[in-house]
Every structure is written in structure tokens, then in C-alpha cells.
Amino acid sequence: MNSPLAQPPQLIDLSTRSTLEDYQDLAQAIGLRKISCTVEEVPHHELGSITRATATAVIPNPWLGTGTSQDLSERTEAIAPLLAKLLSDRLLNALGGAEQVEAFGKAALVGSDGELEHAGALIHTPFFGNLLREALGGTSIICFVDGRGVPGESLRVPMWHKTAAATRTHYQTLELSLPDAPHAGEIAVIAAASSGPRPHARIGDRTTDRTVTSEILKGIQL
Amino acid sequence: MNYRKLVTIVEEIATEGGRPVDPVARVVIVAAVFDNPWAGQGFVEDLNPGIDSAASDLGALLAPRVIEALGAPLQAYGKAAIVGLDGEVEHGSALIHTLKFGNHFRDAAKATTLLPAVEKRGQAGVQFDIPLKHFTDATIRSHHQSVEARIADAPHPGEILIALAGATRGRPQERLAPLSTEQ
């Protein structure tokens, strides 16, 4: 594997540093090709507005050419925390801080030369998920999509409430297109956040649902 | 200015051609989606009242947001008008090809050149590329570039999407001889 991370280790403290402006060292460590942030603001009659954002990092697949028995843990532990930091910094900047985040989600698309498991490795372990969850002030499992994709791919990133995943008002997705990414040998890693619920959520919740089972199929009215 | 949504896209290019881009190249698009001022009116001969009702407000809405999101001095810029399927391309052109719109961006960016533009009609989610040129000298070849965009769920048939784009520098890894070397 040709990874710059194999070079002599340099210890840095990322816990308090912003990566919005100064991140060339991180970019080079993971081979970051580009990072983009899309922010959508929708006026809302009660909330003023709802802001939803995605942040996407595109990096070379560190496991290209390796087989399905390759241990993915070493590269995952080295790369995923940097991605979580770069992406969460941009989401927090877009929404105005963790207290503004109500829902979150994540995604990964691996280019056609990679394995689905490579995409999963970068978002489905604590080295990404726990850091993203902590940065955004959440406690829920983070919902996701993953898959293999081609440049120009369009996807819908799912989000749900960051501390109460079953909160129906906050089930929502954010549509995102990825110009020129991921290339065949790349992986695109995405994090998403919303400052609010769906604009006009009005389909009840678990607390208001009556009991529904397949018994209702016995008396369907047409 | 009433809009359905406002979308800001910030793209940072850190590597191109296998080499680091230093400083990182930052390109920003800010797009507003709103009702076509001429929707449902048939062929409107005089577009000026509609232009007066929206063009300046649009420029004032979008321009400062591009500058703020760039976070560094603007060096190249461009604009876009994407008209929903029930409108005319001329409706989009009307809103961006007026000094009432563009001067907001030129003033905010301390720019002097005309803004290169894309105008088209399309369905919601249509892909478009915004051309950008240097902000004070449109012949500077290093800054000829474009940025790709696709705004989800916009424009609807009765809407228009208007966008401004700005870049902090020329193309990543630009290395073409200037125009003057061929004259």
C-alpha cells in the first residue's frame, strides 16, 4: 500500500484545533483530493428557517488492490478520525454549533475499483461514528447509506434525531450530487446534519399512534 | 426577497493531478430558488417591471454570501440562471443580464469585468456548469474555469434558480502560457 501515513508518525493535537482553514497537513496525510460542503436554508413559518448541510471528503481508497482478507483496521483507525474532524467542523460551521444540530446522518460511496467493505470501514466504526456523534452533540446511532458509485453520483443521505432516533418528525433525507467523484480508486465520505424537522411534519409519532397489527388486514375498506 | 430555498456550496480542492494544491482552491456557489415573476402571464412583452421587482434584491441577497463563504479575496466569478420548464430562458436572462443584479457582486468583490454566465431551462435537479473568469481582466487565462452544480428539487416548472459563483484563485495546477504569448 502506498500511504503517506506509513511515514514516520507525527503527533498533533486536533482536539481543539479548527480544520476550516488550516488543514494542509491532514489533507496530505490522507491524500484528500477535495472537500465540499452544501448548505440548504429553507424559510419556515415558525422556526425562521431550517438549515441542512452535507460535508463530503474525497480521498484515495487506501485498500486498492488488496483482497477480501485484508485487515482494514489499521488504515481505518488512522484515516477515519481525520475525516470525522474535517467533516464535523464544516457541519458545525454551517449550522452554527452543536446546539443547532437536531438530526444527523452519514454516507460513504466507494469507487468502482474498490470493495463495498472499504466504504463501510470509514463510516461504520467508532473511529468515525463516535467522533461525529460527539462533535454534533448526539447520542443516537447514526443512520447511513453506503454503496459503490461513479463520478457524478447522486444520493440521498438519511438523517434522524441525534438523541431520539425514533422521533418521527426528524426522519428526513438530503439529496446530494457529487460532481467528479468518486473516481474508480477513490472513496467519498459524507456527514450530514439538520437544524430541524421536516418542514411541515404532521404524521404523528409513536406516542400518538394507535396499536396497528396485521389484524387490520382483515377489515380493509376500499 | 422571498425564496423557497437558498443553497450554498463550498468546494475546496486540496489535490489535483496527484499533487497538493497550495493554497487550497476554494470555489463557492450561492443559489436562490423563487417563483418566476412572469409565471402564468403568457408572453410578456415588457420584462422591465419584473426585472425591477427582483433583480437588485437578488444581487443584494447572493453577493455578500459568496464573499463570506469564500473566506479569502475573490479572484474569479460567474453567474447562472436556470429557468423552470414553464418559463422562458429570457426570464432568467432578464434577471441576471442587468447591472441592477451584477453590480452588487462587482461592488462586493471590487471587480470590474462582466460576469460570464450560463442560462438554460431545465427540470428540477438539472445539472449546470457555471463559467468563471478573472474579476478584473477577463483575458487572464489562468482563471478561466467552471464549476458544476445540481440543486436538488429545483427549479420547479414555475420557478427560477439564480446563482452567483466565486473562486479564490485560478485553476488548480494552472500552467498554460498567457494569452499575450500568442499575440
Image: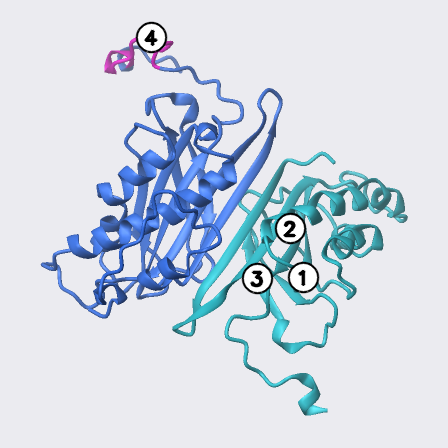
Q: Which residue is mark 4?
A: A210
The answer to whether B152 appears left or right of A80 in the picture is right
Colour mapping used in the image: by chain
Dot placed on the residue nearer the N-terminal end, 2 or 3: 2
Which residue is rendered at x = 64% and y = 50% of the image?
B66
Farthest left residue in view: A69
Marker disc for residue B147: 3
Q: Secondary structure at mark 2?
A: helix
Q: Which residue is mark 1?
A: B77
Which residue is rendered at x = 57% and y = 58% of the image?
B27
Query: What's the magenta region?
Result: A206-216
x then y, percent, for residue B176 = 57, 83
Badge 2 amino acid: Val
Q: Secondary structure at mark 4?
A: loop
Real-space Cα separation, disc 1 to disc 2, in angstroms: 10 Å
Q: Are marks 2 and 3 on the same chain?
A: yes
Dot placed on the residue nearer the N-terminal end, 1 or 2: 2
Instruction: Tell me the chain of label 1.
Output: B
Real-space Cα separation, disc 3 to disc 1, in angstroms: 10 Å
Marker disc for residue B66: 2
Real-space Cα separation, disc 3 to disc 4, in angstroms: 50 Å
Say which quarter of the image contains residue A182. Answer: bottom left
The answer to whether B22 appears left or right of A5 in the picture is right
Which chain is assigned blue?
Answer: A
**Residue A207 lies in the magenta-colored region:** yes
